[in-house]
Image (cartoon, grey):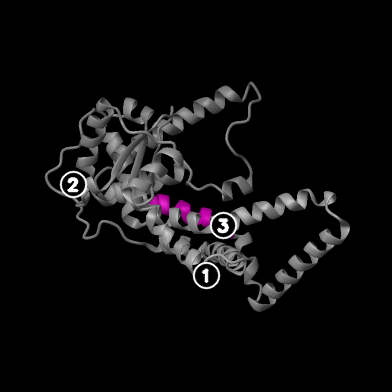
Amino acid sequence: MSTSDELPTRTGRRYISARQRGADAFTLGRLALHLPHVLAGLAVVLGISYAVDCLGGPPWWVPSSLWVLSGALTFHPPCERLLARHLFGLRLPSPEEDGKLRSVWREVTARAGVDGDAYQLWVEDGEDVNALAAAGHLVGVTSHSLRTLPSAQLAGVLAHELGHHTSGHAWASLLTSWYAQPARLTWRLLRRLARHSDHLPVGVTAGIIGVLGAVMAALATATYGLVFLPLATPYLAAAVSRRAELKADAHAARLGFAQELMTVLREEREREESERAAAMPLGVPFGKDGLIARLLESHPDVHTRLHHLRALAEDRR
């Protein structure tokens, strides 16, 4: 196992991808699970567009079409840079960080047979080992990871994130979140109105409840109860996300970084166990406990990830 700052010796590309990115089963599953939210968001936009049209504004199809097309802007490089800074809290790497990061990234993308220059490299100021793949071309890594991880282990982390991009996990996550946003905002507004319903006249409150009840009953009848499927979506989406993480681990293993990624995970597990042991005598809560919290976890536990990586490493021997 390589623990030095040198990348593992490579005699040639171990894995060549014919495509820069695609859509695997987990990507399609995420899109399917969030389809009701996306359709609800579109319904909100159509309703607002129709109301504006009735009030003398532009035809309803103009703002609706612009909204549908707006998703493509999230993959435009200038827009991605705005997302990186203001949504994900990333910054451009310093010259020293950029030298190490680009060197490792070139090695990872060369093994994968993809164009590394197509991606934007960013840094998140954080004191843990972490990285992210977002939008269509964003790859971020914490400053702590750059400072403390040897190049070989950093390559394992970045190979995992590249797996999210080439499998389509990153773009699917952004698009479903983007198009579902109108529905989420409307839901928050309705919840706020419900909390302050005691300030509304009794007749208005009763009317709102009656209309919502009638709408839900009609939808439940028309869809044979499928309208209530979004209630289970958080749990199903979390399960799909956990499987997608294992798929990204497998991508790193295929590129030859299984041992390096396992080392990172073991060290993170040891750090968490030390922090948990220090917190217990003080009565300080550490992490999330309980069945519901575990079902909503977006990442598998470290033991599961190590088990899968160990099996993949043994298969390559």
Direction from residue 21 to residue 27 in the image, left or right: right
Comparing labels 2 and 1, the label whose residue is closer to the camera:
1
The numbered disc on residue 182 is: 3
Q: Residue furthest front?
A: 56
Which numbered marker is on residue 110? 2
Q: Which residues, given as a range, are shown in magenta?
A: 233-246
Which residue is found at the position 63% from the left and 26% from the top? 284
Q: Is residue 242 magenta?
A: yes
Of the 4 image quadrants, the one containing the N terminus is: top left
- Residue at the spot of label 1: 59
Residue 249, x across and y down, in percent: 35, 48
Q: CA distance from mark 3 to mark 1?
A: 19 Å
- Closest to the observer, 239 or 55: 55
Query: What's the residue at 57%, 49% (across, down)?
Result: 296
Q: Does the magenta segment cover residue 192?
A: no
Earlier residue among tags 2 and 1: 1
